[in-house]
Amino acid sequence: DVSGAEILLRCGENKLVGGQEDQIIQIAAELAAEAAR
């Protein structure tokens, strides 16, 4: 499982702004893949 906090931290690192929900989903998928390794 990936926490919402982890996703938001990665969004901040990538300097995302509102309206970029597709990138948030991509980040969540990447974090989940990293956690599965």
Image (cartoon, grey):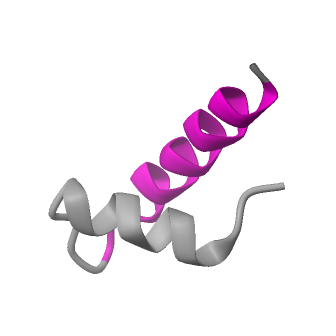
Q: How many numbered dots are placed on residues in this image?
A: 0
Q: For residue 19, what is the image quadrant?
A: bottom left
* Picture coordinates of residue 24, whole percent (x, y): 47, 58
8 on left or right of 13: right
Above or below for 27 versus 4: above
Above or below for 5 versus 33: below
Q: Quadrant of the C terminus?
A: top right
Residue 20 highlighted magenta (yes or no): yes
In the foreground, 19 or 15: 15
30 on left or right of 18: right
Q: Which residues are magenta?
A: 19-36
x 70%, y 69%: residue: 3
Q: For residue 29, what is the image quadrant?
A: top right
Which residue is most to the top?
Answer: 37
x 80%, y 28%: residue: 36
Secondary structure, magenta segment, majority class: helix
x 54%, y 65%: residue: 6
x 49%, y 46%: residue: 27
Residue 33 highlighted magenta (yes or no): yes
Which residue is most to the left?
Answer: 15
* Picture coordinates of residue 33, whole percent (x, y): 69, 28
* Picture coordinates of residue 1, whole percent (x, y): 84, 55
34 on left or right of 5: right
